[in-house]
Image: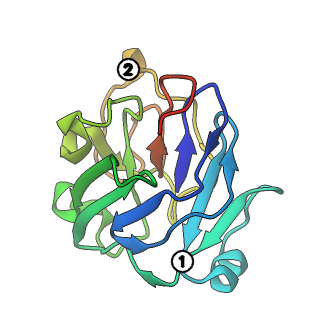
Amino acid sequence: ELMNCGTEAMTLRGVTFTSGVVLTFGDLTLAPQERLLAVRNYTVFTNTYATAPGTKIVPFASGNTAKKGETIAYAAPDGTQILSYTYTRDWYPGTVETGYALEVVNPMLAADDPGWSDGSNWRVGSFVNGTPGTSADAPYDPSTDPGGDEPGGTRAAPNDETLLWNGANGAVW
């Protein structure tokens, strides 16, 4: 799941996943705070999950996000890396074969912040099978983040997505 965390629309044309899934986006724009779901099988996904009307769902042909963990990376059309991070299920065994997702805690980290690959910036989601396309709780507020690393933990913001943050509020590539 991708989200534009900025205040300006963001075009994804030519953005490519370079690790994890195999996908290059076509003519697609995300409005501020809008989410996009990249799914392996569109039919199975839409028959399994209820999503809000208008949710952008883009199928990809191959690759996956490995349950054991891996590196997820994507790049701008010119090849410039946008974000790359590595996750592992070893951070929170409560996600192994339970249906609970790993969710980012602070989506506002800079793209080059090592926190993206640090288990302390991730948590176990609050809901079995996650909340694709939605933010089930309030937006992340570090002053209200009490922790919680087990299913149903008490962290303030389950955000089961990878976030594209356009902090420049303009073109980023």
Task: Determine which of the numbered discs, if any, sits on residue 102 in the image.
Answer: none
| Relative to 135, residue 27 above or below | below
Task: Determine which of the numbered discs, if any, sits on residue 142 in the image.
Answer: 2
Residue under the image location 48 percent in, 71 percent down: 23
| Relative to 46, residue 80 above or below | above
The answer to whether 17 appears left or right of 33 in the picture is left
Task: In this rendered view, identify the residue nearer to me: 44 or 58.
Answer: 58
Farthest right residue? 53
Residue 42 percent across, percent down from the top left: 66, 80
The answer to whether 45 appears left or right of 60 in the picture is right
| Relative to 161, residue 50 above or below | below
Circle 1 residue? 60
Instruction: Judge the density around disc 2: few (<14), some (14-19), many (≥20) Cα neighbours within 10 Å.
Output: few
Residue 102 percent across, percent down from the top left: 36, 55
Residue under the image location 48 percent in, 42 percent down: 164
Q: Say what secondary structure mark 2 lies in.
A: helix
Residue under the image location 18 percent in, 55 percent down: 91
Q: Say what secondary structure mark 1 lies in.
A: loop
Looking at the picture, which amino acid does disc 2 mark? Pro
